[in-house]
Amino acid sequence: MADIIKRIADVLEQRKSAGAGESYSASLYRKGDNAILAKIAEEADELIEAAGEAAGETTGEAAHEEQRRRILHEMADLWFHCQVLLAHKNIAVEELLAELERRFGTSGHEEKRRRGE
């Protein structure tokens, strides 16, 4: 799993030197923090909407599969744009993976308590 995340991170790093007309990611880098953060917010909203629809009352296998597909699509968009932010801020994906590894096995309550100290 980390391999695809690393491959995307490598491509995003390369896109920093591309022209805005050549690359969607490069265009976001050129627009700056606010544009990147707006895309993350947009994708998060779309994921929430998709998940909310999935929690609603729907019937049939086809409807369930369509909702599942949409959640996956929106989550991929959100993760991608979060990786754009990491690259823009020069934070290596390995740093994120190390932070997740550090937290593994620690309860969410404990992690929040530690951050409050």
Image (cartoon, rainbow, N blue to C red):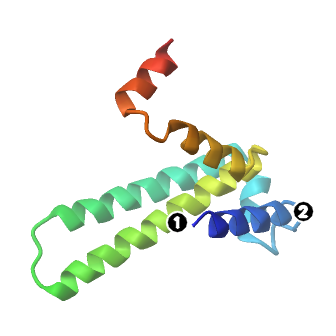
| Residue 95 marker | none
Q: What mark, if any, has residue 17 been given in the picture?
A: 2
Vertical placement of residue 70 versus 33, above or below: below
Residue under the point 57% across and 37% down: 102
Instruction: Name the quadrant of the N terminus.
Output: bottom right
Q: State the residue at coordinates (70%, 63%).
A: 6
User: Under tag 2, what secondary structure?
Assistant: loop
Q: Is residue 31 left or right of residue 100?
A: right
Q: Residues within 10 Å of mark 1 (few under 14, many from 20)?
A: some
Mark toward the start of the polypeptide (1 vs 2): 2
Q: Residue at x 79, y 45 (%)?
A: 90
Type of residue at label 2? Ser
Q: Residues within 10 Å of mark 2 (few under 14, many from 20)?
A: few
In this picture, residue 19 sits left or right of residue 24: right
Above or below 51: residue 114: above
Where is residue 25 drawn, in percent x and y?
A: 72, 64
The percent position of residue 42, horizontal first and vertical second, equals 48, 56
Q: Residue furthest front?
A: 105
Mark 1 vs mark 2, CA separation in Å: 22 Å
Label 1 is placed on what type of residue? Asp
Give the quarter of the image for residue 49: bottom left
The circle on residue 77 is 1
> Which corner quadrant of the image does residue 3 belong to?
bottom right
Q: Position of residue 28 (x, y in %)?
A: 71, 58
Is 88 drawn above or below residue 20 in the view shown? above
The front one of 61 and 77 is 61
